[in-house]
Image (cartoon, helix red, strand yellow):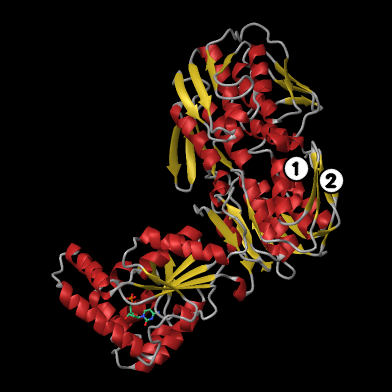
Amino acid sequence: MFATEFLDLPPLQTASGLVRLPGSKSISNRVLLLAGLSAGTTVVHDLLDSDDTRVMLEALRTLGCGLEREGEALRVTGLGARLKTTEAQLFLGNAGTAMRPLTAALAVLAATQGGRFELSGVPRMHERPIGDLVDALRQLGCTVDYLGQDGYPPLRLSAGALRTTAPIRAIRVRGDVSSQFLTALLLALPLVAQGNDIVVEVEGELISKPYVEITLNLLARFGIAVRREGWQRFTIPQGSAYSSPGSIHVEGDASSASYFIALGAIAAPDAPVRIEGVGSDSIQGDIRFVEAAQAMGADVTSGPGWLEVKRSRFPLQAITLDCNHIPDAAMTLAVMALFAQGTTRLTNIASWRVKETDRIAAMAAELRKLGATVEEGADSIAVTPPARTSPAAVRTYDDHRIAMCFSLAAFAGAPVRILDPKCVAKTFPEYFEALFGLVRTRLDDIPVITVDGPTASGKGTLASAVAKALGYHFLDSGAVYRATALTAMRQGVPGDDEAALARVAAGLDLHFVGGDAHLGAENVAEALRDEQVGLMASRVAAWPAVREALRQLQLGFRRVPGLVADGRDMGTVIFPGADLKVFLTASAATRAERRYKQLISKGIPASIDDLRADLEARDARDSNRSVAPLKPAPKALLLDNSALGVDDSMALVLEAWEQRRPFASAKGH
Ligand code: DC
């Protein structure tokens, strides 16, 4: 996951390949609640692991459900509709799919069995309406108190006057604000259906019907056959009781699929983007995004559990579409509009205003930053693309879908900065990694920062810190030479056999996993730090044939979204066209002192004077040697960090980088 302050996407060109979708958020949280209310155990396969499912799991654990890992799956031991814990405070983040159904289920359980539960979330959750659900629960005899503002969480649920023996009147609930209110009631009311049919009547036009269909479908899997008359009246038959299916599979998230369907439509002219996890057999309403994408020009083929998408008509065709049936995926259409000829109009999307953020306002504001002309209606949005897209820093409002759909704007010819990219963790923590696995672009468009400098200048520490702050790849070129040396030593190749060493270099199977160097399957991070390996590396590095063989390997690290490369010839030989070159120095005295502290802390005896003399000699040798001599690249940013800490040096480099970026005042939110 990218936990950086922002993530810069270079202009992107094409995409193809395979993506496996994470599990559906809507299905995951419904299945978890149903498994938690059922008796016995349910093994859940392919559950989504994200912020929204984590708060649900945490709530179930607090309530006394058993949760055990079973390989890749999760074994849930349910409550059997009996409260184990009668008092709890549950924090539900910004997960509507946890807040609404848990409110209904716990209100009913507390009302019938006694108890006291407090449900709260992040500040935005306390701005998302829940009054219609609370009104419905109060009709039943549940006791629900608002702890903050009326109509909104946080809530307290306590013992009430719900008698399951007396006939229960039909419960009325509004359907035109959020379909989650109806879903919450349908999931919870089997708890009180022993003695009565339970009838729920919807007031107003029910929105987002496909989500209610998911609810009915999953209730059926747990033994509850809800009778439905149109979309107005739902009956849970007397005697209904949850019964676990034993094992259940969560299909991939169809809303998450929309980004990759759009990706195929925009950027896969030849080989397709293949999406696995959802397909023609999906029970999720957002699968109908496929039809909208086809109407705009996507070429889609599908089967059970998979989709393949290619670009067909391009530029895309602008469309006018009532999006009530695909409210979440429709956000992706608003970004696809940037690639269409004409104006794309999305209507009947009032629910956008009460989601993670006011999505109509947010989409309009951010699309305008890219240069689009946007008309914002009360329940609609119309987008006309600009002649030329501007680079923009896109604000994401703690809304995963804004971050994900705006990443596609990077195909419109300009770089895009996504602020707070980690908000994708709500439903798709590895979204950007998945995207980067499919995209390609011109090498020159992938930014490179080089950090060169003499030994012990702290360039490795600085470069890896800068890479981390920007979410860029990191190349520790010293490790490349050390890995060559280590392999040569293990194979008994002597340090003076240039041709044999070059063969070792060319055959190196080196990659980095979480910052650690691996040779094949072996983690060699520790082995590379060995003094003998360092000495051999310095001999190996003197051979031009070795340097040439390692050049290709190092160039291969230049991948989306960008690279920070550390080493003495990064800015001069390997990446002479780098966008920012830093030449880091420190006085020999400072470097000697740093090395001295390092050695002493490892228990190795040392003398500062000797170290300093050593460094001065090495500097002279390095700057005068014939191959890759140590010298600052032309126009390099010269940074003497003798008197600076790592954080200060990093701030200076990031500031210099910011000045070279096209996002004016990009950091301001
Ligand atoms: O930075 P380091 O100590 O890990 O580097 C190991 C050796 O490799 C060192 O002798 C310098 C050499 N090297 C090089 O010649 N060119 C680079 N880009 C990086 C390291």
Determine which of the numbered discs, if any, sits on residue 321 in the image.
Answer: 2
Q: Is residue 329 visible?
A: no
Q: Is residue 435 above or below residue 253?
A: below
Could you say which is closer to the camera, residue 336 or residue 576? 576
Task: Return the residue nearer the eye: 642 or 570.
Answer: 642
Q: Label 1 is placed on what type of residue?
A: Ile
Asked whether disc 1 touches disc 2, contact meaning CB atoms under 8 Å apart, the reply is no
Query: Is there any visible trace of residue 647 in the rendered image?
Result: yes
Placement of 632 over or under 129, stated as above or below: below
Residue 390: image location, x then y, percent? 71, 61
Residue at x 68% of width, y 68% of height: 14
Q: Residues within 10 Å of mark 2 (few under 14, many from 20)?
A: some
Q: Which residue is mark 1?
A: 326
396 displayed left or right of 120: right
Q: Quadrant of ligand 1?
A: bottom left
Q: Depth check: give the residue in front, 446 or 632.
A: 632
Q: Residue at x 71, y 47 (%)?
A: 365
Place of residue 200 in the rendered image (x, y in percent of width and height, measured from the top left) = 72, 19
* Closer mark to the observer between disc 1 and disc 2: 2
Amino acid under disc 2: Leu
- Vertical relation: 44 (above or below) 63: below
The spot of residue 323 in percent (x, y) is 79, 42
